[in-house]
Amino acid sequence: MVDLQQQYAGIKDQVDAAIREVFETAAFINGKQVAEFSRNLSSYLDIPYVIPCANGTDALQIALMGLGLEPGDEVITPSFTFIATTEVVALLRLKPVFADVDPKTFCLDPASVEKKISKKTKAIVPVHLYGQSAPMKEIMDIAQAHQLYVVEDNAQAIGGDYHFPGGKTQKTGTIGTLGTTSFFPSKNLGAYGDGGALFTRNEKLAERLRMIANHGQTKRYYHELVGCNSRLDSIQAAVLNVKLPLLDTYIGKRINVADAYDRAFAHHPKISTPYRAPYSKHVFHQYTLLLEGADRNKLQEHLASKKVPSMIYYPVPAHRQQMFAAFHSDREKLETTDWLTERVISLPMHTEMDEDQIKFVTGSVLEFLN
Ligand SMILES: *Cc1c(COP(=O)(O)O)cnc(C)c1O
């Protein structure tokens, strides 16, 4: 699905030098690379506060801890997402409430969110799925009307844009109360191990999040809050400092691959290519087709026989996961989520794909469907 070896080959000298510097200074934890990366990301996203942490799941957890929610408070999330988004809610003894998604964008459907609001609702967690922004204007309007926090799960869309009606553009993840991301190696801005970050415009909240990520500590050995230990290590920060300046180029390459895929699949009766919402710059973490009247399992088998990887993100939505049996009854339906779960298929998508590879992938798909 991704080719990180080839990508490394293109930046080997800089990455090796950056990592060597960490080894030589032996500042493995909280080295100067970490502060430098926080500054770099803050300037790239145009947001004043960036709090680095150990991974994208921790970032979501720390975000919810930082909002001071009480056990039983409700948090509205999509069910059509990676499990981390919803898992941290339950982990903190909050109640995940699943809203449905839009069949075109695959992101939270504001009408469904509104229906799920109760007296206990405290936050909405939109996910910018596959690299496309959720409809943030509508979500922010709902949040404002009901006094709710908004935590943007930006793990799949770092570098993406949201265009407000009227022309203002903001980076995804910088619109809500706070945003979170992951630097898992295969993400659009991937480290060479785990990593994550939170971002916010609120100075007080930023201070609190920083404290929570560091054992609730105000100064060393003085602990004001119950926190956790979640750090971005210096080696990962060093790698990210090399890769962040390349992020927009990498995104451009992903969009080129998506364009070529779109052209090959255009007007096919059994395929819907990814919808690109006019309000969003889609950064194509995934390139995900919707199949109509095609046997997805057989297509996957056919692709596998030709050594073309494909993935189903996600085969079981959160509301049907065993871990959430206590939170969701089978009578509750998320029609679009269930419908999508049976029809989506993601194709290889990365920065190193060349024309021949794209042709081979599209040829293999079309040969099966035609
Ligand atoms: C990857 C991902 C996460 C979790 O990130 P990790 O760094 O793997 O913990 C959370 N949410 C979404 C939508 C993701 O894709």
Image (cartoon, grey):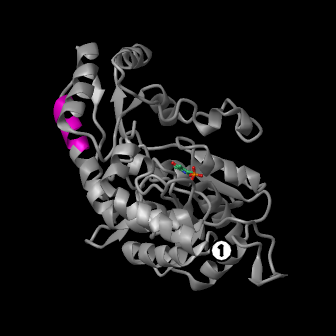
Q: Which residues are magenta?
A: 257-265
Q: Is residue 299 left or right of residue 278?
A: right
Instruction: Please state if 282 lies on the left or on the right of 64 as rendered.
Output: left
Q: Identify the residue at image location x=49%, y=30%.
A: 341
Q: Residue at x 39, y 40 (%)?
A: 2
Residue 32 image position (x, y, % from top left): 54, 79
| Amino acid beneath label 1 | Leu
Q: Is residue 66 or residue 306 the one in the foreground?
A: 306
Q: Is residue 11 visible?
A: yes
> Which quarter of the image is occupied by the N terminus?
top left
Residue 171 image position (x, y, % from top left): 38, 67
Looking at the magenta stretch, what is its main secondary structure? helix
Provide the secondary structure element on which disc 1 rests. Answer: helix
Q: Relative to the observer, which residue lies in front, 72 or 182? A: 182
- Whether residue 260 is in magenta: the answer is yes
Residue 225 locus on image (x, y percent) = 80, 76
Total count of labels: 1
Q: Is residue 235 magenta?
A: no
- Disc 1 residue: CB within 8 Å of ligand 1: no
Q: Which residue is mark 1?
A: 209
Residue 113: where, in percent of width, then height?
Answer: 54, 52
- Look at the picture and state if 64 lies above or below 251: below
Q: Quadrant of residue 353?
A: top left
Residue 243 visible (yes or no): no
- Residue at x 20% of width, y 29% of height: 359
What residue is drawn where x is 69% and y is 54%?
A: 89
Q: Nearer the viewer, residue 145 or 201?
A: 201
Dot 1, crowdedness within 10 Å: few (<14), some or many (≥20)? many
Give above or below for 364 relative to 253.
above
